[in-house]
């Protein structure tokens, strides 16, 4: 089936734009960038239609990549139903966002650079989802991290952008460290990195009641997943990553890359199924992250930050889902989230674009007349994320929450409240932006068709995406949970609607009430608005001590005192001493050298003569 | 006959070589060297190396030494000056050399197994035909490499000399 | 012992003929040049100036031997010696005819038969630079030095096309030995076209011959390439400071070079001693030729241009008849006919040397070097490649 | 002609050693770059004689090939070396080997 063609198209696009983009016209860059993703999307459709119904995984082996002792890692790609969902999300949503970016980036510098990175990102993301072994997946994993770094730091001349890029990169290193350790442990335990072989090996092992090897492996992989998918405690990079252009936030930091952690856990679900302890940890982390991020989201005034925290929060939901063993629910939510969160970001981008770069909600308001399409589409997305019945978010969130309701009721209640909070702060942002009076100074205008078209398509998907029955599609891999829980469904939906109503009351009907609430909350508000001082905490506990140790011990102590003074300079001194003796030999006179050569050859002949003379 | 030829030309070679070392003027040294080379060519003939003998005269006599003479003439090189430098070589050189010759002589006479006696015409292996065959079969790679070396040397000489007369 | 005696006899014969040729070659040159320039040339000494070479020798020998005070004595004296020795030595390996049997003793018409004859000639011609170079340098005179430098560079440069031009006929004959080369050119195509290398299949060496001759002019420092002496710019080049016998040595070496190189050219390209016509006819060609010359002499004697011709021409005619008679003796054919053909070819080439001298002006020095490196050398290389290709393919 | 015994090959080798030693001596004791260079050529020639002698002893022509290669290398070396000497002379105005010492401290 030539699966390798799927990632090849974006790679070609990257190569062309990256190498020659400086000399190409904007139109050509667009054609290459969008065309390559389109080709990839069409080819994905073609492949999937050929492979339908994909009852068994289709895998292809190309060549042996690493051959070392017992370890053999091939360049293998494969497609199963999970991969199929991810492929469609990545190429489909990716294509829409590419089209959107053509309009959004039209007036930015470094145009070709942006699209080259964008294509490269799609390439790595496709490698990630197509990989048939953990190491190849890790290649994609790191590749998307690299692209994320490059694109967050797209405005690298600005301090905040390059700082945010560094932060994203460094925090992810912590996660990748765990991931690598997990892989090493897998190599030791199973002598392979191939998903199929690991699954076969795990199937013969008992479920670990207490912590064991599998628990260790899964927890280490979880560390990696928390880094990539911005979960507690490594979520801090994602809100800052909004420094990149909005399409980047939509594609990388909402729809695809950050969900890689969820995908990875679903991919190695056979490991997690045998480590219940680790699964509980996943679920707890997911739930905590959901609540934590949601509360912060209430207080943010930057429209993109609001959505960023909402992303963290929704990712928490997905983790909750996979942690409860409802993998299909997690993936389902991953897909619907890709639709509505991409739409939210693109809509936000459209607003920002229309306001010439204004991101602060306090300087917006009343935009519904100026940007009707954005208004409607963003409304659909907000309804979807709030879990209003009928919209896509409702179905996927409901799947997760009903899983929670069955397994651990307290998790369900926390999750449901969080759904309410989510609905509240999303609609807070929505109302602040589109209702009331305009509080800014820029002239607002609707975005061009090239931007609104993807919005409309995504709005349709966000509204109707819930009717795609992902859990059934994935049922061969992940058995369906026994029953749909109608009670849970209504409870969570009503929490969402209550959140919307409160938001409407506070920000549309009685705007002054919000301010008085803020002041009355006082310290609590300050705490939340400052994101619980997590960044400051990390700085004080981790960064500062590291800096101090580096400066005092490593630099002053080890480097200057030990290495510089005694080793480097000391060696130098010794060598200089010897050199001052030996340089007498280097008289600069060729004939003296020749004399030494003569003496040496004499010695050689003498020895050879002694040895040979014996014969 | 070939004994006489050997003795005569060996003596010529040694005398010329001494002259090379002792003469103060480069052109005298150059002519002495040509004498050595000519004598060696005759000795090669005695050893049955007719091609090498002729190549010796053509390459050394006709090309290398002509270059030397040309350069000496071009630079109008005069007699040498006395130099006090590299005293080490001047002190240690002679004893080392004597030891060198003595050692080699001892090795050749005492250690090597008895060698053939040279009789002119008893072995004529070095015909142009056989050398050509060897060069183009067994020694083809060294031959090609040495051609490249020559090319590089030509280029180097051209570059060096060109800068000179610009 | 026989070997040494026969060799000594051969050396004596060759030396005598060679020296005479050298002496009279100068007379021929002066005569030919004179006639090219519508003059009469030497006339006073002997009939038609035939005694002029002898007179010259006497003059050179009896002239005062000048030794300028500023020269480098040793090399100044060594240079003409080197020049003349090297010039004379090459003739020793030139074969003038096939293997012959004299009084039951088989021998070659050649002083020594060297396996690597061509290489020997090349070696000697390569070394003969020293004579000129040393003469110019030791004279301590800037004209001489310039002449010597020019001459050395010129000879070194033209040696390349010369050598390359020699290699291509060797590809056809597969020998380095002059005798073998010459013998492989025996026979005729279609019964009348001689298989000389100049027309030898599969690739006629006519271009090689032309290149060889051009390079030979330069190697012998002859016009139009006589930059080393160029009397109007360098006075006389490398031999400005030489006089009397030492000058004669240089003079002799030039002519010896000419003779040698003509011999080499006729051996390599013109089939050596092999006649132009198939044997039944060619045996009588020399006789007929000399009879024809005798008839011409008698005709001139009947209608003399000058008074004295009335006496001299009949004498010449009778001499020619005697020579024709000698060539007509059948049992001498096997010795004399090859020698005649060899001499005829070499003589024709020598005449070409003189002819060119009388015709062409001198090149400028940069033109000379430019010609060698950018035209002659590539041409020779191309010719060599084509020959090798043809030999390999056919 | 008096009948002389043939020369043993070791004489050739000893001649080669002597010539080589003289070459080294020239290298060590002569001051002019040109003469030093000529001494090198002398050493190469001495080695060539050894090659040809051993070739005779073994009755194989490999030694001839080696000495042929040595000649070619010597020719290449002479071309480049003399060009260098020319350059040195133009830049320094000297041919004394001991005066070309600016690499020395």
Image (cartoon, coloured by chain):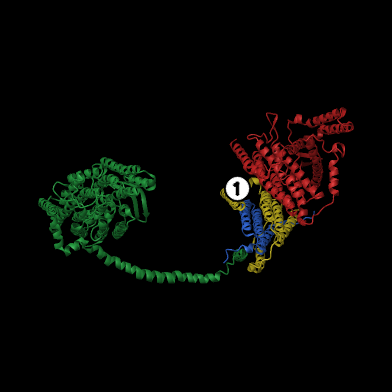
Query: Which quadrant of the structure image shows residue A543?
Result: bottom left
Front residue of this view, candidates A391 and B20: A391
Chain coloured green in this rendering: A
Front residue of this view, candidates A397 and A476: A397
Asked if residue D47 lies left or right of residue C323, the reply is left
- Considering only vertical position in the picture, is A489 above or below C185? below
Chain coloured blue in this rendering: D
Asked if residue A553 lies left or right of residue C310, the reply is left
Secondary element type, mark 1: helix
Chain letter of disc 1?
A: B
Identity of the residue drawn at 35% across and 70% down: A553
Q: Position of residue C282 (x, y in %)?
A: 76, 31
Q: Position of residue D68 (x, y in %)?
A: 63, 51
Chain coloured red in this rendering: C
Q: Note whether residue A461 is visible.
A: no
Chain coloured yellow in this rendering: B
Q: Position of residue C142 (x, y in %)?
A: 72, 52
Classify mark 1: residues with Cα within 10 Å, few (<14), some (14-19) or many (20+). some
Front residue of this view, candidates A575 and A203: A575
Q: How many marks?
A: 1
- Considering only vertical position in the picture, is C114 above or below D90? above
Q: Position of residue D95 (x, y in %)?
A: 65, 60
Asked if residue C321 lies left or right of residue A12, the reply is right
Q: Residue furthest front?
A: A441
Q: Residue furthest left?
A: A487
Q: Note whether residue A232 is visible.
A: yes
The residue pinned by badge 1 equals B135
Front residue of this view, candidates C95 and C370: C370
């Amino acid at each position: 089936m030539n699966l390798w063609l799927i990632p090849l198209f974006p790679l070609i696009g990257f190569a062309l734009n990256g190498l020659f983009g400086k000399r190409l016209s904007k139109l050509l860059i667009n054609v290459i960038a969008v065309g390559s993703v389109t080709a990839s999307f069409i080819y994905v459709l073609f492949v999937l239609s050929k492979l339908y119904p994909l009852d068994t995984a289709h895998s292809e082996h190309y060549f042996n990549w690493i051959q070392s002792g017992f370890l053999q890692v091939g360049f293998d790609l494969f497609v199963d139903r999970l991969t199929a969902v991810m492929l469609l999300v990545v190429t489909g949503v990716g294509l829409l966002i590419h089209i959107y970016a053509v309009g959004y980036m039209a007036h930015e510098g470094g145009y070709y650079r942006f699209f080259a990175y964008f294509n490269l990102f799609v390439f790595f993301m496709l490698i990630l989802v197509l990989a048939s072994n953990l190491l190849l997946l890790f290649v994609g994993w790191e590749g998307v991290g690299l692209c994320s770094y490059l694109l967050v730091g797209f405005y690298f001349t600005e301090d905040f952008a390059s700082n945010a890029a560094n932060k994203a990169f460094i925090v992810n290193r912590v996660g990748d460290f765990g991931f690598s350790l997990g892989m090493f442990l897998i190599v030791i335990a199973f002598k392979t990195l191939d998903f199929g072989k690991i699954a076969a090996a795990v199937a013969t092992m008992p479920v670990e009641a207490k912590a064991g090897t599998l628990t260790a492996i899964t927890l280490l992989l979880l560390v990696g997943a928390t880094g990539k998918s911005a979960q507690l405690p490594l979520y801090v990079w994602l809100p800052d990553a909004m420094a990149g252009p909005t399409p980047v936030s939509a594609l990388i930091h909402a729809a695809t890359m950050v969900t890689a952690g969820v995908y990875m856990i679903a991919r190695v679900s056979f490991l997690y199924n045998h480590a219940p302890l680790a699964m509980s940890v996943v679920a707890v982390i997911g739930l905590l992250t959901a609540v934590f991020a949601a509360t912060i989201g209430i207080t943010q005034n930057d429209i993109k930050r609001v959505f960023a925290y909402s992303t963290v929060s929704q990712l928490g939901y997905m983790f909750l889902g996979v942690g409860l063993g409802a993998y299909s629910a997690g993936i389902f939510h991953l897909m619907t989230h890709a639709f509505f969160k991409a739409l939210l970001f693109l809509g936000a981008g459209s607003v920002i674009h229309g306001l010439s770069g204004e991101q602060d909600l306090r300087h917006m308001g009343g935009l519904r007349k100026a940007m009707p399409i954005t208004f409607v589409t963003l409304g659909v997305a907000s309804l979807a994320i709030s879990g209003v019945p009928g919209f896509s978010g409702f179905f996927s969130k409901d799947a997760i929450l009903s899983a929670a309701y069955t397994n651990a009721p307290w998790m369900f209640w926390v999750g449901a409240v969080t759904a309410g909070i989510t609905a509240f702060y999303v609609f807070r942002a929505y109302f602040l932006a589109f209702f009331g009076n305009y509080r800014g100074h820029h002239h607002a205008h609707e975005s061009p068709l090239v931007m609104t078209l993807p919005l409309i398509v995504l709005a349709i998907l966000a509204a109707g995406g819930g009717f795609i029955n992902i859990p059934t599609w994935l049922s061969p891999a992940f058995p369906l949970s026994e029953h749909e829980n109608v009670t849970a469904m209504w409870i969570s939906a009503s929490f969402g609607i209550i959140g919307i109503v409160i938001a409407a009351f506070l920000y549309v009907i009685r705007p002054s009430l919000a301010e008085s609430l803020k002041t009355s909350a006082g310290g609590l508000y300050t705490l939340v608005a400052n994101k619980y001082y997590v960044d400051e905490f990390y700085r004080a506990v981790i960064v500062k001590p590291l800096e101090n140790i580096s400066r005092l011990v490593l630099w002053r102590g080890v480097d200057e005192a030990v290495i510089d003074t005694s080793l480097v300079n000391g060696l130098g001194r010794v060598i200089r001493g010897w050199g001052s003796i030996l340089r007498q030999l280097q008289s600069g006179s060729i004939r003296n050298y020749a004399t030494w050569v003569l003496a040496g050859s004499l010695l050689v002949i003498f020895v050879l003569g002694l040895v040979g003379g014996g014969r | 006959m070939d004994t006489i030829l050997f003795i005569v030309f060996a003596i010529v070679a040694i005398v010329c070589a001494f002259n090379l070392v002792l003469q103060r003027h480069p052109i005298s040294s150059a002519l002495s060297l040509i004498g050595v080379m000519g004598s060696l060519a005759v000795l090669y003939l005695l050893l049955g190396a007719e091609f090498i003998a002729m190549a010796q005269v053509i390459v050394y006599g006709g090309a290398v030494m002509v270059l030397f003479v040309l350069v000496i003439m071009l630079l109008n090189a005069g007699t040498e000056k006395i130099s006090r430098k590299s005293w080490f070589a001047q002190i240690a050189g002679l004893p080392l050399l004597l030891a060198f010759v003595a050692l080699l002589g001892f090795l050749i006479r005492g250690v090597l197994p008895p060698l053939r006696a040279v009789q002119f015409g008893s072995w004529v292996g070095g015909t142009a035909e056989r050398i050509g065959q060897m060069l183009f079969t067994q020694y083809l790679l060294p031959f090609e490499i040495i051609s490249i070396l020559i090319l590089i040397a030509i280029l180097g000489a051209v570059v060096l000399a060109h800068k000179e007369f610009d | 012992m026989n070997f040494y005696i026969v060799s000594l006899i051969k050396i004596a014969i060759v030396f005598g003929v060679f020296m005479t040729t050298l002496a009279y070659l100068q007379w021929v040159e002066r005569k030919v040049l004179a006639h090219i320039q519508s003059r009469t040339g030497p006339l006073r000494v002997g009939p038609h100036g035939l005694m002029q070479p002898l007179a010259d020798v006497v003059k050179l020998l009896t002239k005062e031997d000048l030794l300028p005070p500023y020269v480098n004595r040793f090399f100044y004296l060594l240079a003409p010696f080197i020049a003349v020795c090297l010039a004379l030595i090459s003739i020793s390996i030139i074969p003038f005819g096939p293997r012959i049997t004299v009084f039951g003793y088989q021998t070659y018409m050649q002083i020594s038969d060297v396996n690597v004859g061509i290489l020997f000639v090349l070696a000697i011609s390569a070394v003969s630079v020293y004579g000129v170079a040393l003469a110019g340098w030791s004279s301590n005179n800037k004209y001489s030095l310039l002449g010597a430098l020019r001459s050395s560079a010129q000879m070194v440069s033209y040696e390349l096309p010369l050598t390359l031009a020699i290699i291509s006929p060797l590809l056809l004959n597969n020998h380095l030995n002059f005798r073998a080369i010459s013998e492989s050119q025996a026979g005729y195509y279609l019964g009348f076209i001689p298989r000389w290398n100049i027309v030898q299949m599969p690739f006629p060496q006519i271009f090689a011959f032309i290149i060889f001759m051009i390079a030979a002019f330069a190697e012998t420092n002859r016009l139009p390439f006589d930059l080393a002496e160029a009397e109007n710019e360098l006075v006389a080049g490398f031999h400005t400071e030489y006089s009397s016998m030492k000058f004669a040595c240089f003079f002799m070496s030039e002519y010896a070079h000419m003779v040698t190189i003509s011999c080499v050219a006729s051996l390599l390209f013109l089939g050596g001693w092999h006649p132009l016509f198939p044997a039944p006819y060619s045996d009588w060609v020399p006789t007929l030729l000399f009879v024809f010359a005798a008839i011409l002499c008698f005709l001139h004697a009947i209608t003399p241009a000058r008074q004295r011709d009335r006496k001299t021409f009949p004498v010449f005619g009778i001499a020619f008849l005697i020579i024709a008679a000698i060539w007509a003796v059948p049992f001498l054919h096997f010795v004399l006919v090859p020698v005649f053909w060899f001499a005829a070819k070499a003589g024709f080439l020598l005449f070409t040397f003189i002819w060119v001298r009388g015709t062409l002006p001198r090149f400028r020095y940069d033109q000379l070097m430019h010609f060698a490196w950018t035209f002659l050398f590539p041409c020779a290389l191309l010719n060599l490649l084509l020959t090798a290709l043809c030999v390999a393919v056919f | 002609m008096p009948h002389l015994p043939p020369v043993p090959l070791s004489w050739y080798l000893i001649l080669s050693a002597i010539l080589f030693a003289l070459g080294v001596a020239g290298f060590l004791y002569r001051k002019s770059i040109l003469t030093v260079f000529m001494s090198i050529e002398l050493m190469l020639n001495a080695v060539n004689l050894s090659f040809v002698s051993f070739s005779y002893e073994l009755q194989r022509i490999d030694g001839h090939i080696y000495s042929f290669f040595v000649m070619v290398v010597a020719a290449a070396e002479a071309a480049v070396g003399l060009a260098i000497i020319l350059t040195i002379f133009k830049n320094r105005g000297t041919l004394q080997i001991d005066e070309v010492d600016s690499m020395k401290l």
